[in-house]
Image (spheres, rainbow, N blue to C red):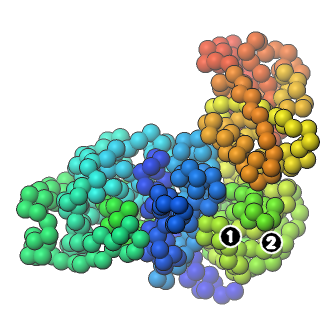
């Protein structure tokens, strides 16, 4: 393959995730991106009656019933000359680990903030992950069509709470029911929008100068004067937009709008395309693998079972990092050293699939895998490439799951095996207390267990009972002691187990027991995340 063709394909890729606190409008914005990208003709809504319209990104039956995003979903579409890979993530904190994994596979994020509530706890946590990775962050102040905080308050909170420089690319004209459009500060243009029924179609827009009579006619006098005053203030306090600062993660461009009404959605999408960047190089141990490397490589950041209810399929989501992907190509599964053929490769739009014959760095490809694949695995034409692992985080609640119906043993065991392979929850095996028959399940929040039980019943016909356990804290342990010596040395309220990769973990019934252990067992190193 010619180097010029590879480079051209790399440059036109944009791979990003949308993050937010629950109910900030993340999934609605995702759907509207699909509308403006031409991937759907009629925008769905999680609030549509009787499933007349459903959100393309929320494909799982439980997501449709609850009106929330439970799993991260890949959506790929073309927007002009650009190939866009968009990942819709769960907003609920109980599924934050799934979101963390997605953030390892993208090159930028769009952070959605509810203008009526400002910055909320989950937004803050996800922002810190993005900051740690140093990836560009674009901010969308949503729900301007409802009563909320003033734009200046939102900008001030963004800078003071998150500690990032904010540059308002556009500015709202009016608010609540009087929200009519935005002023583009970079192009010096007013964009006035018209509502469409249910926000199902693209919002008609007209473009004017700020002094045009049409603007003064549509925007009420008080809102117009207020906007003029604020824009004058911004021209003093927020001057000099720096695209380089955006790419360094130091500045977040801020866009205002209403995803429900399609106000400002296209401006956000256009701004993101213009000021974000294509795929970046990746670390593999001491090496750095450039995207221009002709050797194909990528890593698996997600595994999903039963996306097609007619088949017990198991789909791995692969982020391509270098080289060109060709359908049915032979590569190495570097963790096992085995040569495999990537068959049945496809791109996705929610639950819908489309066969993909070739793909390039930045693209996300799904393909069917067997049970020996894990999240974080590398596949490559070069068996020496192993990308840095995706971090795990300590679970915060613990349980054991049981089969109440002996006659349903086979579907129960099959369902558990398949669903746990997705990392819906983390799995640990007891060392002390010794309990070989029951695995310890760890989760960030109880909703993960609810999803596990729901999918066991709906997808495998297996009932289950959940036994919540009193453990409060888990830490990964590093020690030269043998399992038996370490187990024998533990006091009451402290337990020992292993994770799926054989690393030892210590569990505690309380914060006090953890502090006491750290003070008295300095020879044992405890970590919140495995090395």
Judging depth in this view, the residue of 527 and 459 nearest the camera is: 459
The alpha-carbon separation of the residues under discs 1 and 2 comes to 10 Å
Residue drawn at (49%, 83%) of the image: 81
Q: Secondary structure at mark 1?
A: strand
Q: Point out the residue furthest to the front here.
A: 50
Q: Quadrant of residue 447?
A: top right
Q: Which mark is residue 110?
A: none
Q: Quadrant of residue 505?
A: top right
Residue drawn at (60%, 45%) of the image: 95
Q: Residues within 10 Å of mark 2 (few under 14, many from 20)?
A: some
Judging depth in this view, the residue of 86 and 136 nearest the camera is: 86
Q: Secondary structure at mark 2?
A: loop
Q: Which mark is residue 365?
A: 1
Q: Residues within 10 Å of mark 1 (few under 14, many from 20)?
A: many
Q: Pinpoint residue 269: horizontal percent, then vertical percent.
A: 41, 70
Residue on which disc 2 sits:
342
Left or right of 270? Residue 525 is right
Left or right of 366? Residue 30 is left
- In the rendered image, the vertical position of residue 273 relative to residue 446, given as above or below: below
Residue drawn at (69%, 86%) of the image: 1
First of labels 1, 2 by sequence position: 2
Q: Pinpoint residue 201: horizontal percent, then vertical percent.
A: 40, 74
Q: Pinpoint residue 390: horizontal percent, then vertical percent.
A: 67, 50
Left or right of 436? Residue 292 is left
Can residue 330 be seen here? The reply is: yes
């Amino acid at each position: 393959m010619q180097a010029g063709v590879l480079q051209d394909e790399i440059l036109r890729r944009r791979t990003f995730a949308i993050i937010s606190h629950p109910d900030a409008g993340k999934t609605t914005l995702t759907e509207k991106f699909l509308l403006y990208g031409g991937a759907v003709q009629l925008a769905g809504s999680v609030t549509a009656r009787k499933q007349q319209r459903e959100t393309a990104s929320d494909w799982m039956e439980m997501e449709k019933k609850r009106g929330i995003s439970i799993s991260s979903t890949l959506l790929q579409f073309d927007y002009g000359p650009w190939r866009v890979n968009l990942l819709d993530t769960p907003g609920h904190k109980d599924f934050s680990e799934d979101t963390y994994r997605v953030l390892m596979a993208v090159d930028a994020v769009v952070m959605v903030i509810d203008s009526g509530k400002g910055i909320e706890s989950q937004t803050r946590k996800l922002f810190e992950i993005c900051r740690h990775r140093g990836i560009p962050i674009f901010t969308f102040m949503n729900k301007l069509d409802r009563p909320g905080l003033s734009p200046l308050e939102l900008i001030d909170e963004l800078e003071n709470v998150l500690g990032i420089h904010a540059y308002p690319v556009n500015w709202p004209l009016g608010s609540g029911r009087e929200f009519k459009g935005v002023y583009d500060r970079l192009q010096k243009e007013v964009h006035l929008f018209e509502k469409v029924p249910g926000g199902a179609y693209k919002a008609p827009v007209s473009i004017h100068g700020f002094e045009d009579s049409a603007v003064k006619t549509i925007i009420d006098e008080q809102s117009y004067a207020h906007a003029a005053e604020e824009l004058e203030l911004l021209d003093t306090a927020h001057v000099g937009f720096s695209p380089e600062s955006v790419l360094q993660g130091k500045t977040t461009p801020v866009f205002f709008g209403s995803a429900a009404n399609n106000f400002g959605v296209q401006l956000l999408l256009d701004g993101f395309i213009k000021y974000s960047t294509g795929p970046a190089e990746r670390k593999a141990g001491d090496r750095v693998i450039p995207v221009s490397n002709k050797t194909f490589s990528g890593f698996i950041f997600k595994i999903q079972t039963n996306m097609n209810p007619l088949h017990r399929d198991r789909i791995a989501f692969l982020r391509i990092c270098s080289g060109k992907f060709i359908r049915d190509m032979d590569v190495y599964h570097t963790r096992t050293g085995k040569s495999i053929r990537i068959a049945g490769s496809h791109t996705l739009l929610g639950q819908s699939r489309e066969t993909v014959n070739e793909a390039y760095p930045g693209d996300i490809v799904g393909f069917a895998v067997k049970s020996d694949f894990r999240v974080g695995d590398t596949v490559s034409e070069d068996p020496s490439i192993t990308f840095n692992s995706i971090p795990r985080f300590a679970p915060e609640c613990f349980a054991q799951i049981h089969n109440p119906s002996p006659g349903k043993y086979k579907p129960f065991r099959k369902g558990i095996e398949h669903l746990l392979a997705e990392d819906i929850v983390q799995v640990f095996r007891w060392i002390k207390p010794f309990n070989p028959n029951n695995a310890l399940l760890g989760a960030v929040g109880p909703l993960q267990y609810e999803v596990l039980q729901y999918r066991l019943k709906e997808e495998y016909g297996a009932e289950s009972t959940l036994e919540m356990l009193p453990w409060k804290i888990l830490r990964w342990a590093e020690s030269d002691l043998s399992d038996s010596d370490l187990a024998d040395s533990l006091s009451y309220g402290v337990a020992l187990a292993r994770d799926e990769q054989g690393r030892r973990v210590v569990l505690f019934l309380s914060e006090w027991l953890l502090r006491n252990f750290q003070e008295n067992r300095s020879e044992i190193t405890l970590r919140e995340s495995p090395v």
